[in-house]
Amino acid sequence: MFSKKLLLDVSVLDQDDARTGIQRVVKSITSNLYLNPPVGYRVIAVTTIKDQNCFLTARALTCKILNINCPLKDLVLKEEKIIPLIGDVFLGLDLNHKVINQKSYFNFLKSQNVKAYFIIYDLLPIINPHFFPLNVPEIHCEWLKFISHSDGVICISRSVADEYVSWLNQNKIQTKSDFKVGWFHLGSEIGNSVPTRGFPNYAPSILEKIKKSFSYLMLGTIEPRKGHVEVINVLKELWKIGFNASLVIVGKEGRLADEVLNLIKKQVMKMNILFGFNTHQMNT
């Protein structure tokens, strides 16, 4: 018998699946919590709506994550407003900066003795602001301040937890006396993250070329902080002295990627040994 609710905020994923690291973690954890709910809790994925100070069920997204076909969509998947009650738990699973505009909602949670916790994926916009659009570091900082008034945070690694505690101390952020900082290891259960599947049409020719030379693989979103420029510049020096190697890049365009993409395109044209798969071109 389920007496309490575990509410999982999946708002950003529900509105736009960017298919990057955070989205894969959100999908995987949501799937596992639905299949293995904490004793006494009913797991409910929830999403926020613009200009509304509440959360609704995210049933359509949940069915997609769990690979459930719902023939009676109009009836079964009607989204409903969630009313938290005493003993429920709210988990900010997604990186949802918009919660900073819902202070009254979280004050209501406190009044109902509903615990609220948030996942922290990283502090990169604070530590390396030059890798992000101008407004992101400020927004991320405000979000960190906001969640520091919750019941606790759960970081995706010990190093992120240490960085967060250091940030708290440096900025003299006051938390609750029983505020908790935890961390966990990210898993490698790709199958549970509703992954991209299939290959683009040009994949066979690229795979055939890869077989003919030693290859390096860079897997991840294409953006400055991932080091693509540095790797390409090193390989350019090796190519000059006749080193037969290919660089295979699999990923989608990320933030501030123009310089990286221009360099990649130039090398594709010039050397014909640099290849890329854009994950948006794969079958899903």
Image (cartoon, rainbow, N blue to C red):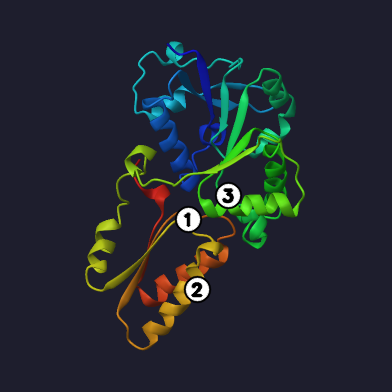
Question: x, y percentage for residue 82?
Answer: 58, 17
**Is 83 positioned to the left or the right of 30 in the image?**
right
Along the line of sight, the residue nearer the viewer: 230 or 108: 108
**Is 162 positioned to the left or the right of 192 in the image?**
right
Give how far apart the Cα atoms at labels 1 and 3 are.
24 Å
- Residue 161 bears which disc, if any? 3
Depth-wise, is mark 2 or mark 3 nearer the camera?
A: 3
Depth-wise, is mark 1 or mark 3 nearer the camera?
A: 3
> Residue at point 35% right, 44% down?
190
Q: Tell me the crowding category of disc 2: few under 14, some 14 to 19, or many 20 or more residues within 10 angstroms, Cα based.
A: few
Residue at which label 1 appears: 221
Q: Amino acid at mark 3?
A: Ala
Element under disc 3: helix
Q: Amino acid at mark 1?
A: Thr
Question: x, y percentage for residue 243?
Answer: 32, 83
Q: Tell me the crowding category of disc 1: few under 14, some 14 to 19, or many 20 or more residues within 10 angstroms, Cα based.
A: many
Can residue 168 be seen here? The reply is yes
The tag earlier along the polypeptide, 1 or 3, is 3
Q: Amino acid at mark 2?
A: Glu
Give how far apart the Cα atoms at labels 2 and 3 are.
29 Å
Residue at which label 2 appears: 230
Q: Tell me the crowding category of disc 3: few under 14, some 14 to 19, or many 20 or more residues within 10 angstroms, Cα based.
A: many
Q: Is residue 246 placed above or below 62 in the rendered structure?
A: below
Q: Is residue 129 placed above or below 75 in the rendered structure?
A: below
